[in-house]
Image (tube, grey):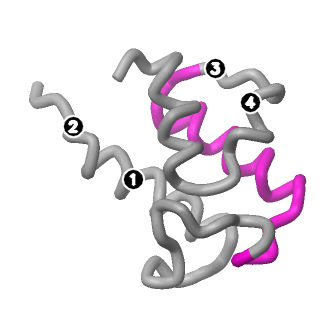
Amino acid sequence: MTTATRDERLETIKDIVCDILEIEEDEVTEVSLFKEDHDADSLRAIEILAALEKKFGVVINQSELPRMVNLKGVYEVVSEPAGW
């Protein structure tokens, strides 16, 4: 089994985020802010968290939500329990 690269994992995270926020992938950058730039609310953030847990088989504490403001932050939060 091949190990996914950072770019591949980031692309998967981006797919999940774009699907939940109902936005086009080209609207999101690694540092664009979900709430400010893409009108995400706290419910969407929890949906993203749940989808990431399911996809990557990890448990993410809801106390990590404040760090999950953009793709870079989400990647960092997921990478810790996933051991990337």
The tag on residue 27 is none
Q: If you read the primary sequence from the N terminus, does the residue marked by circle 3 or circle 4 appear first?
A: 3
Tag 1 residue:
12
Whichever of labels 3 and 2 marks the residue nearer the N terminus, that label is 2
- Quadrant of residue 77 within the rendered picture: top right
Tell me where the magenta segment starts and ends, as one range. Answer: 37-58
Comparing 37 with 26, the one in front is 37
- How far apart marks 1 and 3 lie (CA) works out to 17 Å
Dot label at residue 59: 3
Q: Residues within 10 Å of mark 1 (few under 14, many from 20)?
A: some
Task: Please report whichever mark, 1 or 3, sits nearer to the chain's N-terminal start.
Answer: 1
Q: Cβ–Cβ below 8 Å for labels 2 and 4?
A: no
Q: Which residue is mark 2?
A: 4
Amino acid identity at mark 4: Glu
Q: Quadrant of the N terminus?
A: top left
Q: In the image, is residue 64 above or below residue 30?
A: above
Q: Could you tell me residue 20's position as x and y percent?
A: 66, 65
Q: CA distance from mark 2 to mark 4?
A: 23 Å
Q: How many angstroms separate mark 3 from mark 2 (CA)?
A: 19 Å
User: Which SS does the magenta portion mostly show?
Assistant: helix
Q: Amino acid at mark 1?
A: Thr
Q: Are marks 1 and 2 in contact (CB under 8 Å)?
A: yes
Q: Residue 58: x percent and y percent?
A: 55, 22
Whether residue 47 sits left or right of residue 70 in the image: it is right
